[in-house]
Amino acid sequence: MYLSNKIKCLLLFSCISLIAKAQNAPKPYGAIPSERQLAWQEKEMYVIMHFTPTTFQNKEWGFGDADPAIFNPTNFNANAIAAAVKAGGFKGITVVAKHHDGFALWPTKSTGYNISKSPFREGKADLVKEMMLATNQAGLGFGIYCSPWDRNNANYSKPAYIDEVYYKQLNELYSNYGQLHTVFYDGANGGDGYYGGSREKRSIDASTYYNYEKIWTIVRKKQPGAAIFSDIGPDIRWVGNESGFAAETSWSTFTPISPSKDKKPSPGFVVEATLPTGTRKGEFWTPAECDVPLRPGWFYHPEQDGKTKTPAQLLEIYYKSVGRSASLDLGIAPMPSGELHPDDIKSMSDFGSIIQKTFATNFAKGATIQASNIRGKSKIYSPEKLIDNDRYSYFATDDSVNHAELVFNLKNKSRFNVIRLRENIKLGQRIEGAEIDAWIDNHWKVIGKATSIGGNRLIRLQNYIESDKVRLRILKSPVCIALSDFGLFAEPNMQ
């Protein structure tokens, strides 16, 4: 009985201790991410694929009048495309199931303008399903874009199109193609088109016509794990350009601003100047997605052969997107044959190899670390959490301390040119300024600086640094620090 009571006391003490430790955790600061947004952040890079009759017309935007008979790729292989994407280090594929031309790549019941009217697979094809199966088999996330604008449909701009066509398409796509990691919406809203043969220009009120609040409800019901991308989120915002670059200072929090005082912001109806940087202390957690095509255009054009972005160009985009706590969404475009151009495959593969080699070794691992302050002097928040393998374990300071200095004594003298910082974004985006020094020639030398950190900050140095001691100085934060990762890496020699 004595032993039993003693065990009970020990268990009770352990529970009380754990509760006390949990209560001592830093309070979240501002808006914080959902589980779906955390999963999105961890993917970092994915692609979006454009392939419709527009490809066979050698156009960038289809007018909506293409004969379905022209869509007949002779060598389409979804597994080959997925393999090329995976070799590039990308973690997902978003398929453009319907672009602005209105042609559906699945046998939808909502419109006759779909893949079943083409000769591809003898009229029995479902390209969305083929891509879904290949993507899943490759272990990649699968996403879908179905354009709200439809230049083919006779009822576009009328209520009948929304209720009888577009919502039905979304319900089909979100119900029949497995679990989606993301869904994509853009701001292309009306203009000239075929529209059932009328060949005219049609305008809509982008803030009301589609009723995006209802669309978000459809997504949440059918695909609760899918992160929604659009100009304004709600999960991921557009970065405001198609160069693939996030701003140097990039906040994951965001308050969208409407161009009109009497209307709410919506995709295609927002003040775009607010998109690149986000909003410090914004109302919502809405980090940026940086979309950029691998070639000059989003669709394949033979005259653009030889203009595929090089691995070096992709690397710059990577550091200015993923390295600024955003994501990289790279546009890929099959040729009319259904295959990716060999240049595109090689560029992605070489880029993926560079990324893999760069981050294979973290020279900060095994370092001994001194910190100017540790929250409650507790091992739970010790600086060693910065070099473990848990993305969300973290070093923290006391509530009254909003700056810190950490010295990393490396196991060996190391040569590196990339510095990685990550906050525990489950507690919000906190840090507003940091500098990194290296011990060189018996004194500290500033080698890197950053403003915003967020879920992932990569500082790419102009030159390689050799040192056995590095110092991180958190200079500015409105609240105590909650930093989860510090890494030192070296790009391979690319000469």
Image (cartoon, rainbow, N blue to C red):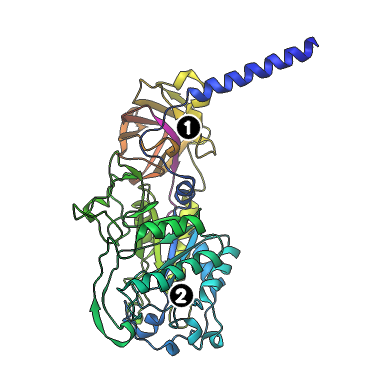
For the residue pair 353 and 224, the one nearer the viewer reads as: 224
Q: Is residue 7 left or right of residue 418?
A: right
Q: Residue at x 34, y 25 (%)?
A: 402
Q: State which tag comes first along the sequence, 2 or 1.
A: 2
Image marks 2 and 1: residues in contact by CB distance under 8 Å: no
Name the residue type under label 2: Pro
Tell me the element at label 2.
helix
Q: Quarter holding the N terminus?
A: top right
Q: Is residue 469 visible?
A: no
**Crowding near pointer 1: few (<14 within 10 Å), some, many (20+)?**
many
- In the image, the segment drawn in magenta is 481-495
Residue 1, magenta (yes or no): no
Q: Residue at x 47, y 83 (%)?
A: 337
For marks 2 and 1, give the CA distance.
43 Å
- The residue that mark 2 highlights is 342
Q: Is residue 228 left or right of residue 107?
A: left
Q: Quarter holding the C terminus?
A: bottom left
Residue 494, magenta (yes or no): yes
Q: Is residue 481 above or below residue 348?
A: above
Name the residue type under label 1: Tyr
Q: Is residue 305 above or below residue 185?
A: below
x, y (%) of residue 283? 32, 42
- The residue that mark 1 highlights is 394
x, y (%) of residue 368? 50, 27
Q: Residue at x 37, y 74 (%)?
A: 161
Q: Is residue 154 visible?
A: yes
**Crowding near pointer 2: few (<14 within 10 Å), some, many (20+)?**
few
